[in-house]
Image: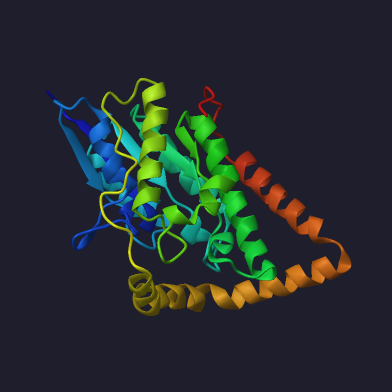
Amino acid sequence: MRPVRFVALGDSLTEGVGDPVGDRWRGWAELLAPGLAPADAPVDFTNLAVSGAQTRDVLERQTPAALALEPDVVSVVIGVNDTLRYTFDIHAVAERLDTVYAAFRARDTTVLTACLPDPGSMLGLPGALARPLARRQHAVNAVVHALSKRHGAMHLHAAEEEWIEDRSVWSADRLHPGELGHRQLALRFHALLTEEGLAAGTGPSAEAEFPAPTRSASLLWLATAGTGWVARRCTDLLPQLLTLAASEVRHRARGTSARLDLSASHAVASALAALSVPERPDVA
């Protein structure tokens, strides 16, 4: 019997950061994999996700490697790191994702996508800093949602308030799910696939297998690896983010903040209009 082949693409979320097992990360995609087939049927799972990856990395590196594996199911959960770069361009993000989705759908591969919460709200940044990041993530989510619909992808809405506000499902860094969060993602993707008759096995347990990190362990992570993570991104993003924040403050003082939202909406509409992909059947 040919095994079900599942390949996961993306960044640290799909790599499994926040869900440690021994000396490695596990994550939602690995938890989901066994449930794609009955218990007595094999599943070949390959995780190509890499921490820090952007849409360019998925297009240029991960997609060719995944296509060579001829997957039945592929997950493409990406975009947060794009919003954290000074090079952010929603037109480029839309074009890359459109190309990636189309490449897999041309081979009749089931594509999994997701909308995600914005990093500013997760980190609890001040409003002037958080709003520009939120605007960028909302733009990415709008593009992912629209392109998922066009290409017939299985799209998971993972940016809703309940997910954001339940701190028990998040890891110490406030940006990645902990084990419970990864299990929730896996279960929700499994439910989508089961509803469409695309998952024949049992989903993962919702209960944690390992105890949550202690407060001291969490603080140690933040003081070591977490500090390095933030520092690397601040070096790249902070100068532009301060400029965006200054613009945010000026617009709020003038009562013209709506212009920033309108500009972002126009950018998303323009990015999608520039793509020549025909409409496909609606898949939520």
Residue at the spot 53% in from the left edge and 37% down from the top edge:
147
**What percent of the width, then of the height, locates residue 6?**
26, 37
Residue at the spot 67% in from the left edge and 62% down from the top edge:
131
Q: Against 12, is 68 above or below?
A: above
Residue at the spot 56% in from the left edge and 26% down from the top edge:
279
Residue 85 shown left or right of residue 9 in the figure = right
Q: Which residue in the rendered view is the most extreme toward the top? A: 197
Residue 185 shown left or right of residue 40 in the figure = right
Residue 135 location, quadrant: bottom right
**What percent of the width, then of the height, locates residue 52?**
39, 63
- Give the image's coloring scheme: rainbow
**What percent of the width, then of the height, locates residue 209?**
26, 49
Instruction: Inspect this view and state whether residue 224 appears.
Output: yes
Badge count: 0
Quarter of the image that includes the N terminus: top left
Instruction: Inspect this view and state whether residue 159 appears.
Output: no
Residue 78 shown left or right of residue 66 in the figure = right
Residue 122 shown left or right of residue 12 in the figure = right
Front residue (pair 39, 93) = 39
Q: Against 246, is 101 above or below?
A: above
